[in-house]
Amino acid sequence: PHVNDPQRNLALKSVWGALLILSAKFTRSDYPRVQKEQKLAIFYSGLDTLGKVEGGNEDNDLLYSVRCIFNAMGWILKSETTLNDFEGRDPIGKSLEYLTNLPDGAWGEEPQLVSGALFFFQQSCVRNILSTNQEFEALMLLCARIAKLVPSTAFSKDFTTIVLWTIKKLDKHFIRKCGIIGALAAVLQSEGLKEDTLAKAHELLQEVLKY
């Protein structure tokens, strides 16, 4: 059956919910050691699933599964992986492609999709899995979109880490035209946001303007 079939989506939700719980234990010192090959098998399965599902699909069960996939892949990156582990698999490109193709409404349908995606990309930054200028540019464009669409959930520690890490890799011309400055400024003009969110947006905007 097609991966976007409702029954398949429900099955994916169950499977990836369990795999997320398992992956989150990989960094615990009291958890039995798991071979890197087994961790990577879960990671590759997540990538393969992202490659098969339609980015325009807004089924809640599917979006929940995608959130779990990004969280699980983030925990696996955090455990003990390096860029060499993913040679030829293009985890960043495939992940960015999926998220770029998501319709605007999907981000609001599954709010924790934002935190899952940000956790994955934050780990991709600090583990040096991102490596090309094209990847850094695409990630910054995604951050600008997230800030614009879901400001109430975007401004986490992971989001700030990603923006400040990525911006160091980009030239000033791209920073000015990519939309991140406008997105942050728009947040400050938004009504109904918490003071903490506005404060984080203001602080991040000040840091971005230094570049």
Image: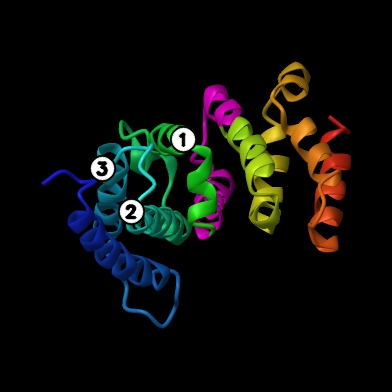
* Residue 10 seen from this side: yes
Residue that protrudes farthest toward the left in the picture: 1
Q: Does label 1 or label 3 sit earlier along the sequence?
A: 3
Q: Nearer the viewer, residue 31 or 166?
A: 166
**Are there few (<14), some (14-19), or many (20+) residues within 10 Å of tag 2?**
many
Circles 2 and 1: CB atoms closer than 8 Å = no
At horizontal 75% and vertical 36% (from top left) the residue drawn is 183
Left or right of 7, for residue 95: right
Residue 48: give its label: 3
Segment tinted magenta in the rendering: 112-138
**Image coords of residue 95 (percent x, y):** 42, 39
SS assignment for the magenta stretch, majority: helix
Residue 96's label in the rendered image is 1
Q: Position of residue 200 (x, y in %)?
A: 81, 54
If you read the primary sequence from the N terminus, does the residue marked by circle 2 or circle 1 appear first? 2
**Is-magenta flag for residue 129?**
yes
